[in-house]
Amino acid sequence: MKRNKETKKDLSRRDFIKTAAVGAGATALAGLGAKEAKAISPAQVPQWDYEADVVVVGYGGGGAGAAMEAHDYGAQVLILEKMPKGLEGGNTSVSGGGAVDPYDKVKAIDHIYALCMGDTPNPTTPIDLVASFVSTIDGVHQYIRDLGGEWNPTTFIHDYSHFFNTEPSVAGSGSRHQSGLDRYFYQGGGAELFKLLAGQVEKRGVEVMYGTPAKELIQDPQTREILGVKAVTSAQKTINIKARRGVVMTIGGYENSPELQSSFFNPGVRVYPAGTPGNTGDGILMVQQVGAVLWHMAAVEWSGLGIVIPSKLLTQPVGSDCSVGVSLGTGSSYILVNKYGKRFTNIALKLSHTKRLALTGFSDYLYFDGQSDDPASKSEYTNYPFYIIFDESHRSKRRVGGSAFKGLYSWSADNTAEIANGLITKADTIADLAAKMGIDAAGLSDTITRYNAYCTGGSDPEFGTPAAYLKAIETPPYYAAEMCHRYLNTQGGPKRNGKAQVVDKDDNPIPRLYAAGEFGSVYGAIYQGSGNVAEAIMVGRLAGRNAAAEEPWS
């Protein structure tokens, strides 16, 4: 819905963009001015076990960017990382390694503001913060090149190009769209990109404490200043770390927190992380305790469908189950059904990024039958849980699942290991398979009979599945696995201003507290593909630089 025509009292978005594109950079990149040191009563100061100028909480792309920049601006830096060594890197390290970079700030501001519902009466992100954000991420690809990294030559592919007009093709970069953004992909993907960043952190001599999750922010009750962090080491010892200048939180989202998921999104539906299992929303609870206001908590970035891997099957303990993606494609004999044995969607509408939420397929997966005035209403998610059903033909020619975060689980090539460990259930008949899975046997039998007839006829009158996907399920034995929904990441967290400062409900900065990355991302509604990596690194740099510029409190 378009907003009403602006009056003289309204700020013209286009006028703002034209001026902000020029001026926002200085505002966004300027360090905080020196602050008068506050006198802290000894009674308010715990016994410090460690200390640094800047403490960075979380070691992914945002944490690496913050640590490097704070160090380069003269600060002593300490990084606290929840995951054990080898599993650090957050979602940056398992991303595709893509990063957007504005080639036209005016268009980029307009575009990202539109993704933040700027054309509605209730934008999720103020336009001045969008402008600061665009200026902050400007130059990310050159920054990585300056560190010694290389990007693959790429054609810009816009996730939402059908929303915009296109410009003439630019030689060497393919078609550019009205987004004002180019997209670059790092050679080797996110794993190699984080390897580059981690190498630069190590080169600077920054200490990283692995297996040391932060638990609480230490705050002066009078001044509200953040003085440090309480954490727990891998030896289960509680420690207090003094942050003389500031704390930067790059701690990720809540992808792996069932409680927070149910509070903010899809109550009653468990969604599993496609990335790091370490993102359990710890930081969200921490910043609430010190007065931060939260934003964008319902903004999530979906991944494809998956299968849950119980913790007992992982190569090392991470405190929770994980998940792997499921390969769904053409020319193979499988269907998706609910507990009633019924198909419920066109399987060609694979769920991946947020753009899929605009399509009809997603409502099929999470349809809730909750008509209070209908006696037949079951008050349930009709199609949750759901299952993949396939036959021997599919089993023998296609690996059903993929790999979990950093190899915590690797699916076997022929699916036999998963039959042995129980991830896949096997039966000689459809009736036996339904009984083992707890699926309605009559419903499943009827569904497969009708589906096979559709395959013979070459069309699916129920859901419009393309003919290329229609292959009969007819070769025993038969197989099933319960499936799950997956997040790439969540975007919510503490609201931050254009200097990466965490703010309270009145937009007042909480002194000495900064945030970056998906922990309070600028993206409050529709995600821009490859947007989080640029945000993590460059807003992380901004946060680290400004934290380093703080006057030490002691």
Image (cartoon, grey):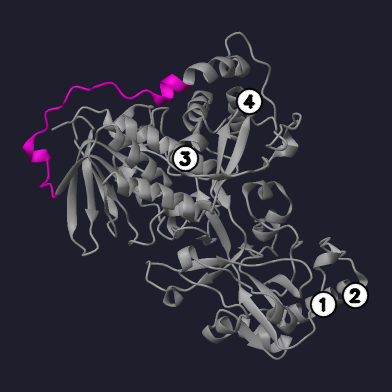
Cα separation between marks 4 and 3:
23 Å
Crowd class of label 3 (few under 14; some 14 to 19; many from 20; radius 10 Å): some
Residue 472 is marked as 1
Amino acid identity at mark 3: Ile
Label pair 2/1, CB-CB below 8 angstroms? yes
Q: Give the residue type that dot 1 points to.
A: Ala
Question: SS at mark 3?
Answer: helix
Q: Is residue 455 above or below residue 519?
A: below
| Image x and y of residue 78, in percent | 25, 46
Q: Circle 2 — which element? A: helix
Residue labelled with disc 3: 144
What residue span does the magenta drawing correspond to?
25-49
Q: Quadrant of the rendered structure where residue 291 is? A: top left
| Residue 469 % position (x, y) | 80, 67
**Quarter of the image where one finds residue 280:** bottom left
Residue corresponding to mark 4: 107
Query: The residue tagged with tag 1: helix, strand or loop?
Result: loop
Can you see residue 253? no
Residue sticking out furthest to the left: 42
Q: Is residue 183 visible?
A: yes
| C-alpha distance separating marks 3 and 1 | 49 Å
